[in-house]
Image (spheres, rainbow, N blue to C red):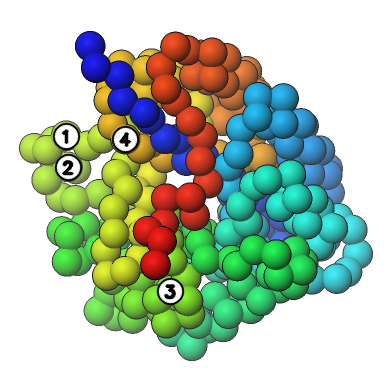
Amino acid sequence: MKIFKKKIVLIWDFDGPIGLINSSLPYNFHFKTLESEIANLRVILDVLDQYDVKCCFAVTGFSAEEGLYPYTFPELIKEIYSRGHEIASHSWRHEWIPLFEVKQVEKSLERSKNTLERAIEGKQNVVGFVPPHNRPMTWMRRGAFSLGDRRIFPFAATGDNEALIRLLKDKNYKWVRVSYSNVLHKLGFRSTKMTGRIFYYKDILLLENHYPGFGKQVTDYILRTNFPTYTLSAHPLMFSFKNKKENRANFFYMLEHLCKSDQKIEFVRPSDLLARD
Ligand SMILES: [Zn+2]
């Protein structure tokens, strides 16, 4: 059997307190949760070093402002970057994009990019965007429609991936993680690649993501299939939750099996996949 070189992109959604505050539905705010997300992140960074794995952390822009730890943490963002990982934007304050107006989304893209770049002292351009809550999931042009977006195109100008991609291009972003499901896929007429595809669309590199987490199922899938790329995502917060696919045990399972397999598997940052111009 011919063995291809497989590149794995792993993106962590690092919401930070501002994200956790804005995500709490139903209300479940605890200071302990904020502390455990950051404690988990520190463990994750050590494990990544141990396995020499480079990946990407998508961080809320407000978290990069100077302020009171742990509510903001520019130093920690700088540390993540200096340990070899890419920093991407996870919006300004974890907005539900379809509910916001175009101007507000533009501000969120601008501000988050600026504050994150300032925190890492301009050593890396922030060119990646990971939409909070994976919204919008609607993409009319590709036959994807999600009532779960809560406000839908054409009633919401920001409720369609086509519009988001246009805004990202305007604001000098180069890649975006997208989650959407075509009607044919939803009805089971077409199969979906478990970890999504990576391709260019209107000069923006799209990383489809259908699979949050790690574990045996996705690890075996990567080992037995031969795609050039695989995208995985996870939340530092879930790392300590025993019942989540994104937890510590599953993370170790994946790293042990992929990093020590005899296949040519390499973890890369999303920007490593950008076409050089
Ligand atoms: Zn998030």
Tell me the crowding category of disc 3: few under 14, some 14 to 19, or many 20 or more residues within 10 angstroms, Cα based.
many
Could you tell me if the residues under marks 2 and 4 are in contact, i.e. CB atoms within 8 Å?
A: no
The residue under label 3 is which amino acid type? Leu
How far apart marks 3 and 2 lie (CA) works out to 26 Å
* Residue drawn where x is 43% and y is 74% of the image: 168
102, 123: nearer the viewer: 123
Judged left or right of residue 239, residue 43 is: right
Between discs 1 and 3, the one toward the N terminus? 3
Tag nearer the camera, 3 or 4: 4
Is disc 2 in contact with disc 1, using a CB cutoff of under 8 Å? yes
Disc on the earlier residue, 3 or 2: 3
Q: CA distance from mark 1 to mark 3?
A: 29 Å
- Could you tell me how far apart the alpha carbons at marks 2 and 1 are, in whole angstroms? 6 Å
Task: Rate crowding at label 4 as few (under 14), some (14 to 19) or many (20 or more) other CA atoms within 10 Å.
Answer: few
Per the rendering, the mark at residue 191 is: 1
In this rendering, the answer to whether 137 lies above or below 164 is above
Give the numbered dot on residue 72.
Answer: none
Front in this rendered view, residue 83 or 170: 83
> Number of marks in the image?
4
Q: Nearer the viewer, mark 4 or mark 1?
A: 4
Q: CA distance from mark 3 to mark 4?
A: 25 Å
Residue that label 3 marks: 168
> Is the CB–ligand 1 distance for label 2 below 8 Å?
no
Q: Which residue is denoted by mark 2 in the rendering?
A: 185
